[in-house]
């Protein structure tokens, strides 16, 4: 089969009437067009042009082949336009999954910055589809292709996904104002915290993984108490703690307002590093599209 560029040259010769005119339109030399036409004649096995001192023109057979070529070239243009539109749609649509702390407290300003930056350079804003899941479920959504980019807070990072730490988040142990720990004059010990039933998130939550992992590191011989209650959202955990059910640990971002307003009291814990990475994840086989790269850069800047 002849290549599309040779057929494009043939079509230009037919439409413009000469090799020189076709060469000017295509931005190549007349000799290049002539050589390509000879190669095309050799491939087709028929004469496509008549050559004379006054120039070269298509034969009747050449004109017929040029008409057929136009149909193929039109189909190729439709294909190219269709593929280009798919690239555009992909670039302007970004599926993001994030753990609750990131989705509630960090992503909103990141997305505002992304939109402002895109509009500032005259680009249409990216349509971001945001879903919220715990860290384990967020990793699975990225792994399955249901999300293009994920943000998790778990210290247990998925080894099969590409990842980049974009920030850090601090956990805070909090209690209701009437809880005995609220008036402690000395910090709580990690052993006391490990032995206390807490209000916690569900299994797979980055908040829970971070706390349990740090306690296991500091006091590996201390038996961990069973949770007082497991809840699926940070808001539910906050409400249960404020209601006096039990102490708990949440992102400092998530309890900041409650602590400032006196609905919760933050408790110091001696020697416990309640700090966890915020990590962006994506599939290794599919590098982030432009909008995802821009969002990653914004997240990394805080």
Image (cartoon, rainbow, N blue to C red):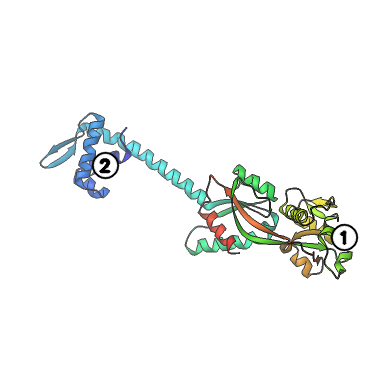
> Relative to 66, does residue 119 appear above or below in the rendering?
below
Place of residue 196 in the rendered image (x, y in percent of width and height, measured from the top left) = 86, 56
The residue lying toward the viewer, choosing from 193 and 134, is: 193
> Could you tell me which residue is drawn at 20 percent across and 31 percent down?
47
Residue 218 shown left or right of residue 138 in the figure: right
Q: Quarter of the image holding residue 48?
A: top left
Foreground: disc 1 or disc 2: 1
Q: Which residue is mark 1?
A: 244
Query: Which label's residue is closer to the chain start, 1 or 2?
Result: 2
Frontmost residue, 282 versus 224: 224
Residues marked 1 and 2 touching at CB (< 8 Å): no
The answer to whether residue 148 is seen in the rendering is: no
- Mark 2 residue element: helix
Q: Which residue is mark 2?
A: 9
Q: Which mark is residue 276?
A: none
In this view, the residue farthest toward the front is 221
Q: Residue 283's x, y, as percent?
A: 57, 46
């Amino acid at each position: 089969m002849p290549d599309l560029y040779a057929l494009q040259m043939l079509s230009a010769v037919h439409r413009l009437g000469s090799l020189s005119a076709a060469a000017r339109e295509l931005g190549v030399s007349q000799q290049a067009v002539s050589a390509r036409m000879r190669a095309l004649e050799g491939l087709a096995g028929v004469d496509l042009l008549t050559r004379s001192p006054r120039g070269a023109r298509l034969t009747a057979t050449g004109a017929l082949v040029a008409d057929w070529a136009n149909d193929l070239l039109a189909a190729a243009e439709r294909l190219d336009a269709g593929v280009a539109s798919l690239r555009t749609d992909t670039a302007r649509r970004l599926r993001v999954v994030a753990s609750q702390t990131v989705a509630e407290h960090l992503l909103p300003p990141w997305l505002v910055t992304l939109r402002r930056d895109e509009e500032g350079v005259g680009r249409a804003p990216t349509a971001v589809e945001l879903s919220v899941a715990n860290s384990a479920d967020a990793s699975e959504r990225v792994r399955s292709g249901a999300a293009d980019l994920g943000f998790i807070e778990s210290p247990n990072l998925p080894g099969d996904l590409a990842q980049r730490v974009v920030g850090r988040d601090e956990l805070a142990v909090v209690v209701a104002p009437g809880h005995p720990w609220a008036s402690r004059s000395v910090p709580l010990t990690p052993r006391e915290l490990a032995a206390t039933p807490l209000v916690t998130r569900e299994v797979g939550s980055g908040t829970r993984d971070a706390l349990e992992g740090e306690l296991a590191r500091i006091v590996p011989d201390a038996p961990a108490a069973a949770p007082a209650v497991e809840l699926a959202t940070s808001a539910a955990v906050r409400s249960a703690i404020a209601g006096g059910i039990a102490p708990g640990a949440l992102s400092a971002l998530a309890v900041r307002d409650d602590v400032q307003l006196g609905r919760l009291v933050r408790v110091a814990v001696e020697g416990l590093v309640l700090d966890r990475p915020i990590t962006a994840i994506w599939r290794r086989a599919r590098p982030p599209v432009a909008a995802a790269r821009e969002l990653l850069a914004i997240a990394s800047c805080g």
